[in-house]
Amino acid sequence: MYFDTAEGIVYRPPSEANSFILRVTIGCSHNSCTFCNMYRQVQFRIRPMKEIVEQIKSAAAYNPNLKKVFLADGNALVLSTNKLLEIIGLLKSTFPNLASITCYGAPKDTLRKNISELIELKRAGLRMIYMGIESGNDGILTSINKGVSSEEIIMAGQLVRDSGIRLAAMVILGLGGKTHTVQHAISTGKVVSAINPSVLGVLTLTLEKDAPLAIEAEQGKFIPLSPLETVEELQQMLQHIHITRPCVFNSNHISNLLPLTGTLPRDKEILLSELKELLSLPRKVQLT
């Protein structure tokens, strides 16, 4: 649900399809990852409370009983804690049945918050933060201009978990191309293990038109994986994920060749066996 005429295209996680999308910023404060083209066409800005209040009023007029809100755009945690608390407070006073408030949170912006601030946001009603890990390999993180190291990603992820806010982490298969597929799989598995997110979403790299990484691919500087190679990469990544607390695992995004869901660590061997079964089929059958 969306009540806004501001510039740019609206993006949100698939699981927030039924949420009220409240754009507290326009665009992404980093907006430099080479694989992403989502916010290239808009100038990043933090929205004044007047614009935010107008969106909330429009939503309340349409559905005063809504239960889910997603704070967009790219990383709402760039806002000050006080402003976030003000927005959350307004949402809760406007929608008495509100049960879930979530947002994107880039590692760099998350690390600008301390544990006390995150705990305060959790108590106010922030239920989940979606964080893009993308890769756990420092060389790949540098090449895609993520702006953070694997150590910083681990610190940000653990900070969210320690605050009690649920963490939905996302990784991207194929981000290292053919050259660095092994390093990407192993390092990403280790970073996920160190964070132990509440939810792990796996996507497959899609080279968006005019994105810097797509241009590199056209020039032969980046060699994408084939669909089956992404499955092999996922298999190796999953083998290197060792966690102790339950984590919902989803690789059922439309970009993935093989849709998988389960709970780690309980279903790890089942998931690995499904990957092994696909890879053991004759090549012609694998791709049908």
Image (cartoon, grey):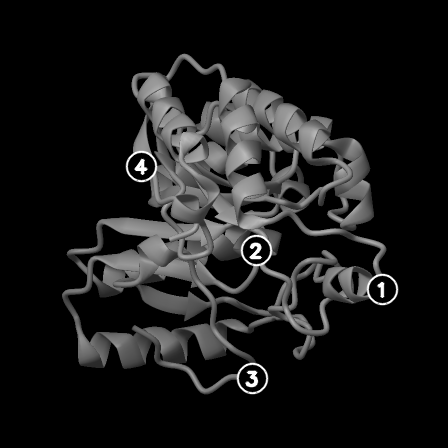
For discs 4 and 2, the disc positioned in front in the rendered view: 4
Identified at 39% across, 80% down, the residue is 54
**Point 49% across, 71% down: residue:** 49
Few, some or many residues within 10 Å of mark 4 (<14, 14–19, 20+): some
202 and 128: which one is in front?
Answer: 202
User: CA separation, marks 3 and 2?
Assistant: 16 Å
Amino acid under disc 1: Gln
Q: Which comes before the other along the chain, label 3 or label 1? A: 3
Q: Which mark is residue 219?
A: 1
Q: To which residue does mark 4 refer?
A: 261
Residue name at image x 60 percent, y 20 percent: 190
Image location of residue 133, percent across then percent down? 60, 39
Disc 3 marks a residue whose amino acid type is Glu
Task: Please state which of the two labelled residues, at mark 1 or mark 4, is closer to the viewer.
Answer: 1
The answer to whether residue 158 is seen in the rendering is no
- In this rendering, would 85 be left or right of 95? right
Q: CA distance from mark 3 to mark 1?
A: 32 Å
Q: Are marks 1 and 4 in contact (CB under 8 Å)?
A: no
